[in-house]
Amino acid sequence: MAVKIAVTRETRAGETRVAATPESVRKLIALGAEVTVAAGAGLDAAVTDQAYLDAGATIAADAASAISGADILFKVREPSDAEIAALKPGALFAGLINPYQSRPLLDALAVRGVSAVAMELIPRITRAQAMDALSSQANLAGYRAVIEGAEAYGRALPMMMTAAGTIAAAKVFVMGVGVAGLQAIATARRLGAVVTATDVRPATKEQVESLGAKFLAVEDEEFKNAQTAGGYAKEMSADYQAKQAALTAEHIKKQDIVITTALIPGRAAPRLVTAAHVASMRQGSVIVDLAVEQGGNVEGVKPGEIAEIGGVRIVGFANLAGRIAADASALYARNLVNFAGLLISKEGALAPDFEDEILKAALVTQGGVIVHPAFKG
């Protein structure tokens, strides 16, 4: 019997992405699955119901109808209470659910008997790269951060030499050089800005310089050991943070656009830009805070808004990847297709190997309980 996969429209306010595209539907069907999409699920990402039908999916009238009898529910974000209630016990759910801050959701999924996978917990190992939704979405968010920064800045980024005179290139400073930061550097460079960047992980220095940007950091012993085995930044000591703040204080006041991307899994975003830093910046300067959904890197940031403090604009838009919904959906849907290969047997049956290192790392609920060690108790 074929695996039944459901895809519904996102219920979180402002979420424009969708968990399946016509391309991914065709690939899921090739794996032996039947795909049902709730009517209108892809409209915000420029995917029509007819496009899904042409790819081989069935269109259901609403979310409950799509989920009824489904073995798997794929979403971008968390399911609603109604969607959880519509899932049959033993079904599998996968989405970006922010498990560190979503205990009631985990409890509800467990009580329903759903095997829930948090896509942000996919391990950063070679075999899982094609399933790494955090990276695929952060890449686009880094690009969009530069576009939003340029829009708010209101001036040209590249140097321009004209008969009327020369316009100097904008100075862009990227704080946090993960996937989003690297894409922000590359995008700002392509647009002609002079780019500098900083990060607490020593391995990023070479990456920054390979993109034609200048690296800025306090390079002491703590800096040399500031990366986990999984490639994430460790939280730095108060002493190091003070030294780094002193180093950046003079630098930041000369910048036109600052982009902050620093996140620590399971923790509030570290404060990188203080009110004093903001006050030191020139009139018309811009800061784009990619960490706003986890509290923000910038003092004074307002979620979902552009705050203006002393003539400095602080862009606090959440879900920047969702502002490029079509491309973000396409990449995320491909992540899910690759992940589905761990769930569906060669015969097209639901057969997840819960001992597989990838699935085991991302599984948060199973058999009526929370099973991930980080969220038990």
Image (cartoon, grey):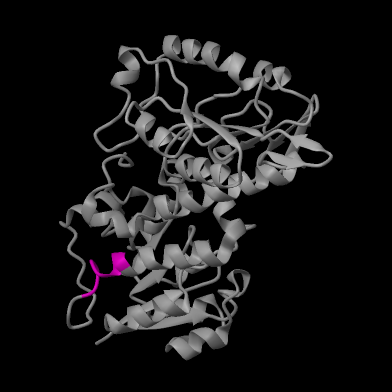
Drawn side of residue 92 relative to residue 86, left or right? left
Q: Nearer the viewer, residue 283 or 260?
A: 283
- Magenta residue span: 338-344
Quadrant assignment for the C terminus: top left
Residue 310 appears left or right of 70: right
Which quadrant of the view contains residue 336? Answer: bottom left
Horizontal and vertical percent position of residue 142 = 52, 46
Q: Is residue 305 above or below residue 31?
A: above
**Closer to us: 178 or 157:** 157
372 drawn magenta: no
For this orientation, the residue located farthest to the front is: 163
In the image, 134 versus 15, the foreground residue is: 134
Q: Residue at x 18, y 52 (%)?
A: 357
Q: Position of residue 238 (x, y in %)?
A: 44, 12
Quadrant location, the N terminus:
bottom left
Give whichever of 15, 213 is nearer the camera.
213
On the question of residue 11 being in view, the answer is no
Task: Identify whether 19 is placed above or below 188.
Answer: below
Q: Is residue 285 above or below residue 110?
A: above
Horizontal and vertical percent position of residue 277: 65, 19
Q: Judge whether residue 279 can be spotted in this image.
A: yes
Quadrant of the rendered image containing residue 347 = bottom left
The number of numbered discs placed on residues in the rendered structure image is 0
**Residue at horizontal 44%, vertical 63%?**
331
Check if residue 340 falls in the magenta segment. yes
Which residue does the image show at 28% across and 48% down from the upper left? 123
Return the x and y of residue 118 as percentages of the image width and height. 37, 53
At x 35%, y 72%, the residue is 72
